[in-house]
Image: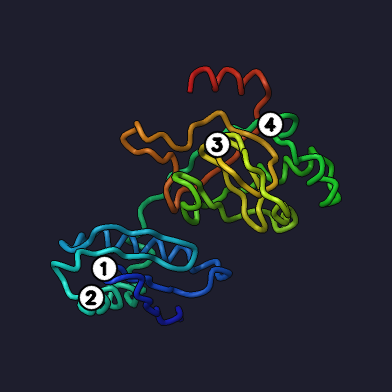
């Protein structure tokens, strides 16, 4: 039995639907299933959806519909558990090439030492899982990936960096992710991808979407340079 959804008013034109606890591995798929159901129904008042680990923000046109009407409709959708596994869109699996270590992953040596692993073992264990994009946040196109080996969890830096290069792959707590553009950041950097995860000039600016699967593939300097030239 899934928890009863609860609702929080974010604004006059937005509801935050809480579907459970972020530590529950079944919760995030239900968030994406609910988002898919809502998009599929495409109510005329819908403006936008923002999924997170355990909640879904729903933005609506309050000139066209009463907030309580939206809440009642959302509650009916959220309680429709029978649809939760059938309306979730087919997920894509996207391979992300990563040059681990060296100048591309300046924290990898210290991270391996802190975890009691060799650098090669850390890299192999980071590249092994099939990750899920739990949510996009922090910066446009930044994927929060679930599925990290718990043995690789690392605390964030005590003092965040003011400059993290675009494409940097990092570990922050029990999550891993990729910085899509140059920005500040406090995650432990272990590698970098030549792929452009966010490009505002593309028809779909973000390479990844919530619910996508991600697999990291280790590459060498030559491959990184070649892919960067073609990006």
Vertical order, 91 against 88 (above or below): above
Q: Position of residue 3 (x, y in %)?
A: 45, 80
> Label 4 vs label 3: CA separation?
13 Å
State the residue position of label 4: 104
> Label 4 vs label 1: CA separation?
43 Å
Mark identifier at residue 13: 1
> Label 1 vs label 2: CA separation?
7 Å
- Say which label, 1 or 2, has the lower sequence index: 1
State the residue position of label 3: 182
* 4 and 1 marks in contact (CB < 8 Å): no
- Say which label, 4 or 1, has the lower sequence index: 1
At x 36%, y 65%, the residue is: 57
Residue farthest to the left?
64
Q: Position of residue 195 (x, y in %)?
A: 52, 31
Q: Position of residue 24 (x, y in %)?
A: 55, 70
* 4 and 3 marks in contact (CB < 8 Å): no
Few, some or many C-alpha atoms within 10 Å of disc 1 (few <14, some 14-19, many ≥20)?
some
- Say which label, 4 or 2, has the lower sequence index: 2
State the residue position of label 2: 67
Q: What is the total number of numbered labels drawn onto the structure image?
A: 4
**Which mark's residue is nearer the viewer, 4 or 1?**
1
């Amino acid at each position: 039995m899934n928890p009863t959804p609860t609702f929080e008013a974010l604004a006059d034109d937005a509801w935050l639907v809480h579907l459970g606890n972020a530590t529950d591995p079944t919760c995030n798929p239900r968030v994406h299933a609910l988002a898919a159901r809502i998009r599929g129904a495409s109510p005329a008042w819908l403006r936008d959806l923002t999924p997170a680990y355990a909640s879904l923000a729903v933005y609506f046109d309050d000139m066209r519909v009463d907030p309580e009407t939206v809440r009642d409709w959302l509650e009916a959708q959220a309680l429709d558990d029978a649809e939760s596994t059938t309306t979730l869109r087919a997920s894509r699996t996207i391979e992300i090439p990563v040059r681990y270590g060296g100048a591309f992953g300046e924290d990898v040596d210290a991270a391996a030492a802190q975890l009691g692993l060799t650098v090669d073992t850390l890299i192999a264990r980071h590249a092994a899982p099939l990750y899920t994009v739990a949510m996009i946040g922090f910066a446009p196109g930044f994927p929060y990936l679930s599925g990290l080996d718990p043995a690789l969890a690392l605390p964030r830096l005590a003092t965040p960096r003011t400059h993290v290069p675009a494409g940097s792959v990092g570990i922050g707590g029990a999550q891993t992710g990729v910085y899509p553009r140059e920005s500040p950041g406090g995650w432990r950097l272990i590698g970098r991808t030549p792929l452009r995860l966010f490009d505002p000039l593309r028809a779909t600016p973000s390479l990844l979407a919530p619910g996508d699967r991600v697999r990291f593939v280790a590459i060498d300097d030559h491959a990184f340079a070649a892919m960067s030239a073609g990006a």
